[in-house]
Amino acid sequence: MAAKEKLEAILNVALRVPSIMLLDVLYRWDVSSFFQQIQRSSLHNNPLFQYKYLALNMHYVGYILSVVLLTLPRQHLVQLYLYFLTALLLYAGHQISRDYVRSELESGYEGPMYLEPLSMNRFMTALVGQLVVCTLCSCVMKTKQIWLFSAHMLPLLARLCLVPLETIVIINKFAMIFTGLEVLYFLASNLLVPYNLAKSAYRELVQVVEVYGLLALGMSLWNQLVVPVLFMVFWLVLFALQIYSYFSTRDQPASRERLLFLFLTSIAECCSTPYSLLGLVFTVSFVALGVLTLCKFYLQGYRAFMNDPAMNRSLWKHFRAVSLCLFLLVFPAYMAYMICQFFHMDFWLLIIISSSILTSLQVLGTLFIYVLFMVEEFRKEPVENMDDVIYYVNGTYRLLEFLVALCVVAYGVSETVFGEWTVMGSVIIFIHSYYNVWLRAQLGWKSFLLRRDAVNKIKSLPIATKEQLEQHNDICAICYQDMKTAVITPCSHFFHAGCLKKWLYVQETCPLCHCQLKSPSQLPGLGPEPVQQPNPGAEQNTRPGDAAEPPGVEHDAGPNTDDNPSQSSGQVADGQDSLEASAETEGSRGMDRGTSPCEASQGAACAAELMAAPEGCPARDPRVSIQL
């Protein structure tokens, strides 16, 4: 990002913060108490403060102006701030001129200035101030007509011409009136600018809503206004002002305990309005993002944002991961203990304590699974039931999480029924019950049913014998490991029972041919015995992606074989021999053209599986497989 773009991004946030601060002040302002204070003071005779409804309308006008300032485009917002700066400079010029006239009246000297050093000093100071004001106004308004901002220099010129002091007072008032008329003329000439801006903004909003919808409009405004960063900066400014106001009223330095108390008290004071509370939410989210980034950097250094699935054998990296887990195990538990010691228990504190306990439980389950993986790593052979053990560990700590959430709901309901009832507390209980109890129970029960169905399907599949494994002579197509024990699917594919069970958690089809896995008794023409392979060297398992059939391939139905079964079987045998011969011929041609033996054997396997595929599985054309 270039320096100009960074500056524009900073200005986009900094120029909108005062509008949110104005909204916060208007929310804190109590109009009724304000008028009660006015009636007790000497200002109750002022006509401006006698019309309460006028002040109420001004209160709502302030809300409207704040929202307008918040949603203005950056270019118009910068222009508005420049106009406001020009008004402040003109007011500063008026103050300089008034102070000079007052000091001259107090001195009473009407002679030449160069004969009186103090008078000359006052004149030069006022002259330099007025020149600076005029120059800055012309630069801000981007005009060379500097005389438009030099009306406050008339009293200086009159004093230089030895005009009497009473006349200088009249000239100063004339300069003020002239400047006010200039401001009124500028406002009148730009009176329709807000209307034109609102009209163009409305037209653009209607076009965006018609083309993209309300959601796209909301996301566009969210990104243009940079809402999270804007509210975070607003809350940090409030927090800094709160800290500054505390230290500015205290002469003695605060102790360490008082600093912690000051920190917590300032955070609480900065959450008294919805705007400040929303700012705290975004601040906490950014702090959490920073902590997460630091944790990633602590765990993996500069490679923290790169995926590295390979197991790392560095002891230092293992130590960093385990130390972070131990910290997340101990610190939330200690925080929950300290909360119970120093505060009286209520529903909100119980939510914080339950979150801390859940964090410790999740880390404890993660550490236990890590120990299991390390034990399996040091073993010579993998543990076959490792997935079941990990499932039981995850199920145990998820059950504990469910019990903790259930206890929180029970305590909240009892406090609502027998204690104080609040709308916010009831809403929190309802949300907590739905997301942390009901949805969690549904997900757990669904996971249990899927696992039970997968186990039942695995048990219903026949187990391959040693002769079948030796005849098959292949590896598991899921884990690419040798098969000492395997199960046979109805489509005559061999897999590890554990690998196929994990596959069935995701979908209920064969990983190779994507047939629906049913029990052998449900398939027509197949008994409980496994189907023998017609060619042990041809039908070998390939990867799951290689067995998928390309869309749009049509197959011939073949002759009708219902009348003559023997002829049908003979035709099928002849067709199988011819297909195998054609596959071998095409494989030899492919090898002659530079095709690898693996591609040729794959084509032969596809041709053999065309005749061996049972009912319900998609047939494949060997010619298409060989070409692929």
Image (spheres, rainbow, N blue to C red):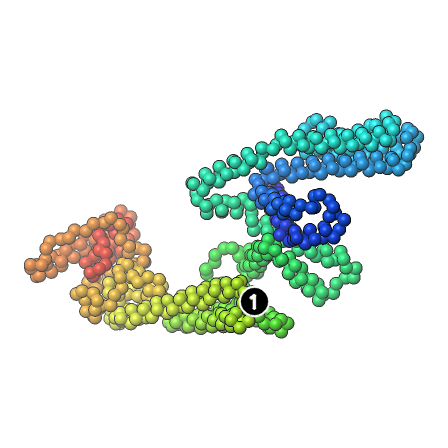
Q: Quadrant of residue 499?
A: bottom left
Horizontal side, residue 432 vs residue 522: left or right: right
Q: Residue at x 28, y 55 (%)?
A: 548
Residue 299: image location, x then y, percent: 55, 61
Give the x, y percent position of residue 406: 47, 71
Q: Quadrant of residue 536?
A: bottom left
Decide if residue 85 is on the left or right side of residue 73: right
Q: Is residue 37 left or right of residue 419?
A: right
Q: Specify whether residue 376 is in view.
A: no
Q: Residues within 10 Å of mark 1 (few under 14, many from 20)?
A: few
Comparing 50 with 472, the one in front is 50
Q: Which residue is located at x 83 percent, y 32 percent? A: 169
Query: Is 323 in front, or is 112?
Result: 112
Secondary structure at numbered mark 1:
helix
Query: Residue 200: horizontal and vertical position, in percent?
Result: 52, 35
The correct choice, above or below, for 553 with respect to 143 in the image is below
Which residue, given by chain and number where applicable, does mark 1 sit on? 348
Which residue is at 73% across, 27% downward? 147
- Which of the 4 quarters of the picture holds residue 488? bottom left
Give the amino acid at mark 1: Trp
